[in-house]
């Protein structure tokens, strides 16, 4: 995998993590009843993307 494609993957993962974190926060703030299974699902999705990023080769 080239460094350019690694950087593209990292950028995509960062965008996804940011989007998921925003959705999670929105759900926590705006929902009267917190759906704990959904909160856990979001946390797991965020965690899995962070894990993927951690295992990508460094681009520098």
Image (cartoon, helix red, strand yellow):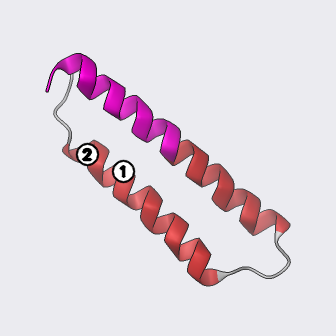
Q: Residues within 10 Å of mark 2 (few under 14, many from 20)?
A: few
Image: 55 above or below 43? above
Q: Say if mark 1 contacts mark 2, CB within 8 Å.
A: yes
Image: 8 above or below 50? above
According to the picture, the residue beneath numbered tag 1 turns out to be 50
Q: Position of residue 54 (x, y in %)?
A: 26, 45
Image: 15 above or below 44? above
Label 2 residue SS: helix
Dominant secondary structure of the residues highlighted in magenta in the image:
helix
**Residue 28 falls in which quadrant of the image?**
bottom right
Can residue 60 be seen at all in this image of the molecule?
Answer: no
Is 16 left or right of 32, judged from the image as shown?
left
Is 32 left or right of 34, judged from the image as shown?
right
Q: Is residue 9 magenta?
A: yes
The circle on residue 54 is: 2
**Residue 30 falls in which quadrant of the image?**
bottom right
Q: CA distance from mark 1 to mark 2?
A: 6 Å
Label 1 residue SS: helix
Seen at 50% across and 47% down, the residue is 17
Q: Position of residue 9 (x, y in %)?
A: 33, 32
Seen at 29% across and 53% down, the residue is 51
Give the position of the C terminus as an image quadrant: top left
Q: Which residues are magenta?
A: 1-16
Seen at 54% across and 65% down, the residue is 42
Q: How many labels were placed on the picture?
A: 2
Seen at 57% across and 53% down, the residue is 20
Q: Position of residue 47 (x, y in %)?
A: 40, 60
Q: Position of residue 21 (x, y in %)?
A: 59, 53
Can residue 15 be seen at all in this image of the molecule?
Answer: yes
Q: Is residue 3 magenta?
A: yes
Q: Residues within 10 Å of mark 1 (few under 14, many from 20)?
A: some
Is 49 left or right of 42, judged from the image as shown?
left
């Amino acid at each position: 995998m080239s460094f350019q494609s690694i950087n593209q993957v990292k950028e995509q993962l960062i965008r996804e993590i940011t989007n998921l974190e925003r959705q999670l926060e929105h759900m926590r703030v705006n929902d009267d009843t917190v759906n704990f299974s959904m909160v856990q699902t979001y946390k797991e999705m965020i965690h899995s993307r962070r894990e993927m990023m951690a295992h990508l080769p460094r681009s520098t």
